[in-house]
Amino acid sequence: GQNIDQPTEMTATEGAIVQINCTYQTSGFNGLFWYQQHAGEAPTFLSYNVLDGLEEKGRFSSFLSRSKGYSYLLLKELQMKDSASYLCAVRDDKIIFGKGTRLHILP
Amino acid sequence: DSGVTQTPKHLITATGQRVTLRCSPRSGDLSVYWYQQSLDQGLQFLIQYYNGEERAKGNILERFSAQQFPDLHSELNLSSLELGDSALYFCASSVGAASSYEQYFGPGTRLTVT
């Protein structure tokens, strides 16, 4: 079956680093996305990985291991505005989203 | 502002009714996606259209249908509404049909079925 797992909630401190993990089991694989979603708002694109390795984009990095069905999103120098849900999504012939990880940032 | 527009922003209707949600993609985008987001299910992919043709289908109920018009706007029709259809419905667009293209999400339509 198709399954994407992420932790439901995480808490971190302003200025720190946090890693949000995502594991997936899908029948096919055509790439993995990370989206950020603030409460009541639309998701916004953060990153896309299709090959193994680390993609860095400013304070955010995303890693993929296709053999392990595993990805993580790394957020550095956390800011209060990073408090949001982070959605992991995998595409085979259609796109499947995980239920998201709610990240709380403490001052 | 992603450039994707959705109307209406809120919709309240009764069980058994039919509603139509509308989406206009970003200028130049040919693909439109529809998603349903409820608290317990997360974001569920419903359907994708590319340049007027159905491209991919997800967990879309038979009571739901969609289409993309020649001007590329799309409509999602929900009929015989049930309480469980209450959710936030997002439309997203991307420039191409392929999986690598970033999707831009509209602000959503919040549907409440009473």
Image: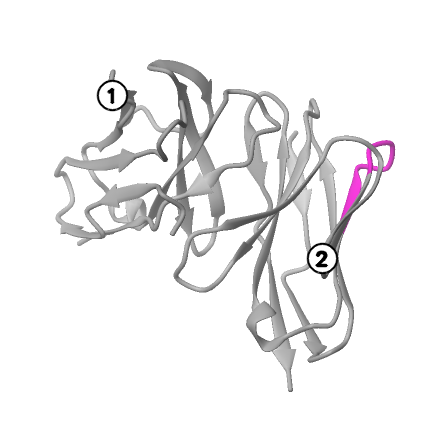
In the picture, the quarter occupied by the C terminus of chain B is bottom left
Q: Report the disc number at residue B71.
A: 1
| Amino acid found under the numbered disc labelled 1 | Asp
B61 to B104, vertically: above or below: above
A36 to B28, vertically: above or below: below
Is B91 situated left or right of A2 in this image?
left
> Around disc 2, counting alpha carbons within 10 Å, would you say few (fewer than 14), some (14 to 19), or many (20 or more)?
few
B43 to B94, vertically: above or below: below
Residue B27: image quadrant is top left
Residue at 55%, 36% (x, y): give it.
B102
> Around disc 1, counting alpha carbons within 10 Å, would you say few (fewer than 14), some (14 to 19), or many (20 or more)?
few
Q: Position of residue B107 (x, y in %)?
A: 34, 51
Please state the chain letter of the residue tagged with numbered disc 1 in the rendered image. Answer: B
Residue at 68%, 59% (x, y): give it.
A7
Taking depth in this image into account, of A5 and A60 the one nearest to the observer is A60
Q: Secondary structure at mark 2?
A: loop
A59 to A95, vertically: above or below: below
Residue at 28%, 24% (x, y): give it.
B65
Taking depth in this image into account, of A33 and B104 the one nearest to the observer is B104
| Amino acid found under the numbered disc labelled 2 | Gly
CA–CA distance in space, label 1 to label 2: 37 Å
Q: Which residue is mark 2?
A: A58
Residue A53: image quadrant is top right
Does A104 appear in magenta?
no
Q: Are marks 1 and 2 on the same chain?
A: no
Magenta region: which residues? A65-72
